[in-house]
Amino acid sequence: MVDILRFVSDFFKRSSDKDKKLAADISQIIGSKPANIHLYKLALQHTSASKETGKSGFRESNERLEYLGDAILGAVIADFLFKKFPYKEEGFLTDIRSRIVNRESLNNLAKKIGLNKLIVFDGNRKTVLTHKSMNGDALEALVGAIYLDKGFKYCKKFIIKRLISPHFDLEKIVETNSNFKSLIIEWAQRENRNLRFEIIEEKGNLHNKEFIAQIVIDDKPFTTGSGYSKKKAEQAAAEKSCEILQLK
Amino acid sequence: MVDILRFVSDFFKRSSDKDKKLAADISQIIGSKPANIHLYKLALQHTSASKETGKSGFRESNERLEYLGDAILGAVIADFLFKKFPYKEEGFLTDIRSRIVNRESLNNLAKKIGLNKLIVFDGNRKTVLTHKSMNGDALEALVGAIYLDKGFKYCKKFIIKRLISPHFDLEKIVETNSNFKSLIIEWAQRENRNLRFEIIEEKGNLHNKEFIAQIVIDDKPFTTGSGYSKKKAEQAAAEKSCEILQLK
């Protein structure tokens, strides 16, 4: 009996020691002590290490927090760029945002702030190897956890002061031209080629339309691209042309 | 001289009378008096009635606010659904969100709250006729204006209390099955057909991957669909199959 009690007490001690260590690590990253440590534990729990909760087979992992954090991150960066560039159009703001928030940059960011070391995952599962966005996903989930734990204002401050400002060179991002459409237009003018963009197909329904754009050079179809707006489809087609013509 | 002074004074009187009327209309919609009426004016200014501001040809319209409001709306609805459905996976939450926030529903919502009557646009321009999302865009811009004017908390309350709760029947939205993949799988089982999904193409780069899925029935290719994830591509292919088989 005494042994069992000791085991139980040791178990909770170990568990609470672990929580204390995690709380300290999280404080380091977010700048203040977590109020609800369970949110952060969940944020760090990759789906490969998910546990069934008994609620009709629902498995607990960081995927729901990732969904929430992704939306909060998008809103905060939208606000940040809106105020940073008061005379830039929404196309520019959308473009810059997608260069800050994408799988590659979030993965890197997670490593830079040391979040990757805290993620709990099942290293034996094959899925982990194919899961290339584990670190970035955990970062989004962390944003979701901070939002729920500390509120929007604190979460916004965290994103700007601890993620964006120290790790992104906005000037450099702005300078890098990823406008493939203008690159290919400039090329055509330089090379004296006849270039046009055509929308050759519209697919899907009202809520989910997709367009296929084609680039025609000297009356010959060159590349196609698809996207959820005509502009995006043209950009995708232009990107492919730039690749082929080595304009990138 | 007296005439000019009277003209100027009349001009400002008319202009401030207009502002007062707009402030009253906005109060009616958002539930409190606007602090900065100019934000709301801008939110209601369609691009067809945009004005050049002298800052290197930048034209002022509601498009920037729409970009901001779109992100805020997405975040608030993500939060709302996250809390409303604690045991649902992120795929479910994403699906429900896209059924609440889409062009058609935002257009309808804008009309329901009377926002469409306040929009300033150039009725003579042909573009207006082709601009089918004018009302929904203005609603997103209004959300952006409220966020800037009153903060996140107030804006969130506005979205939930004045947009979602009175105008969406969540139960009904959840019940409507738009899971075309399960519809087609059920059909195949019922009809004793051999059905399989194949990913036949992967396009794009690391940041912007696109998949083409194919549905094969009794070893014959039936429909294809594309999307930015394998799941979405399969759904798109399944939706087309459902259309052809009239399962929708």
Image: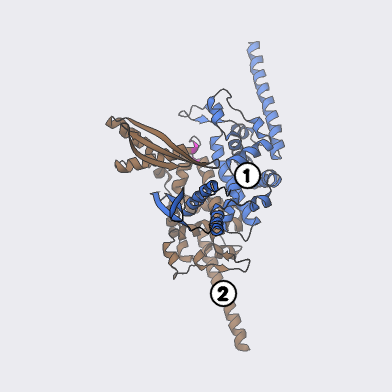
Chain colours: A blue, B brown
The residue lying toward the viewer, choosing from A225 and B87, is: A225
Q: Quadrant of residue A114?
A: top right
How far across and down, in percent of the image, does residue B43 sit? 54, 62
The residue lying toward the viewer, choosing from A181 and A128, is: A181
User: What residue occupies the far left of the structure in this picture?
Assistant: B191
**Which type of secondary structure does the marked residue at label 1 adopt?**
loop
Chain of the residue that carries numbered disc 2 in the rendered image = B
The residue lying toward the viewer, choosing from B25 and B198, is: B198
In three-dimensional space, the C-alpha distance between marks 1 and 2, rounded to whole angstroms, equals 40 Å
How far across and down, in percent of the image, does residue B151 sit? 61, 54
Query: Up-down: is A42 above or below A73?
Result: above
| Marks 1,2: beta carbons within 8 A | no
Determine whether, in the image, residue A181 is placed left or right of residue A86: left
Quadrant for the N terminus of chain A, please: top right
Q: Residues within 10 Å of mark 2 (few under 14, many from 20)?
A: few
Query: Up-down: is B248 above or below B110?
Result: above
Question: What amino acid type should be assigned to the residue bearing mark 2?
Answer: Ser
**Which type of secondary structure does the marked residue at label 2 adopt?**
helix
How far across and down, in percent of the image, does residue B14 sit? 55, 76
Query: Up-down: is B163 above or below B6?
Result: above
Query: Up-down: is A30 above or below A85?
Result: above
Q: Main secondary structure of the magenta part?
A: loop
Residue assigned mark 1: A151
Q: Quick check: do tags 1 and 2 share a chain?
A: no
Chain of the residue that carries numbered disc 1 in the rendered image = A
Question: What amino acid type should be assigned to the residue bearing mark 1?
Answer: Gly
Determine whether, in the image, residue B134 is placed left or right of residue A46: left
Residue assigned mark 2: B15
Range of residues picked out in magenta: B84-90
Q: Quadrant of residue A23?
A: top right
